Amino acid sequence: MEVDNEGRMRSVLRSVFLADEISKSTYLIFGYVIVFDVTYRSNNLNLLFAPFVVVNHYMQPIVIGCTLLA
């Protein structure tokens, strides 16, 4: 996420990327194909929501991260 000079989140949110440790390890296993789709826009701040999705060995989608982009 974007922070100011003192390491605090900016008062005006511009971009935030989220992924936990399980998602990171899932990426290492199944990360050879990633879908990044920004066509979904539903919040009142007019930010793009973009999931990072991989497909596992059962052909099931797994969300490994997401972002809100200005």
Image (cartoon, rainbow, N blue to C red):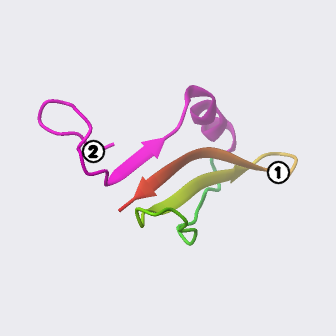
Q: Which amino acid is tagged 1?
A: Gln
Work out which residue is located at the far top of the displayed protein and give it.
21
- Along the viewing direction, whichever of 22 and 9 lies nearer the viewer: 9
Between label 1 and label 2, give the one nearer the viewer. 2
Q: Which residues are magenta?
A: 1-30
Q: Are the residues tagged 1 and 2 within 8 Å (C-beta)?
A: no
Q: Which amino acid is tagged 2?
A: Glu
As drawn, the label of residue 28 is: none
For the point 50% across and 62% down, which residue is it? 43
Quadrant (top left/top right/bottom left/bottom right) for the N terminus: top left
Q: CA distance from mark 1 to mark 2?
A: 32 Å
Q: Which residue is mark 1?
A: 60
Work out which residue is located at the far front of the displayed protein and give it.
44
Q: Which residue is mark 2?
A: 2
Residue 6: where, in percent of width, then height? 13, 30
Report crowding for label 2: few under 14, some 14 to 19, many 20 or more residues within 10 A (C-alpha): some
| Element at label 1 | loop
Answer above or below: position of 14 versus 19: below
For the point 51% across and 59% down, which residue is it? 49
Report crowding for label 1: few under 14, some 14 to 19, many 20 or more residues within 10 A (C-alpha): few
Where is residue 9, by image quadrant? top left
Q: Please say whether residue 28 is one of the residues in the magenta stretch.
A: yes
- Along the viewing direction, whichever of 35 and 33 lies nearer the viewer: 35
- Along the viewing direction, whichever of 64 and 44 lies nearer the viewer: 44
Residue 62: where, in percent of width, then height? 72, 46
Answer above or below: position of 49 versus 7: below
Where is residue 46, by image quadrant? bottom left
For the point 66% across and 36% down, which residue is it? 26
In the picture provided, is 67 more to the left or to the right than 6? right
For the point 22% across and 32% down, which residue is it? 8
Where is residue 70, by image quadrant? bottom left
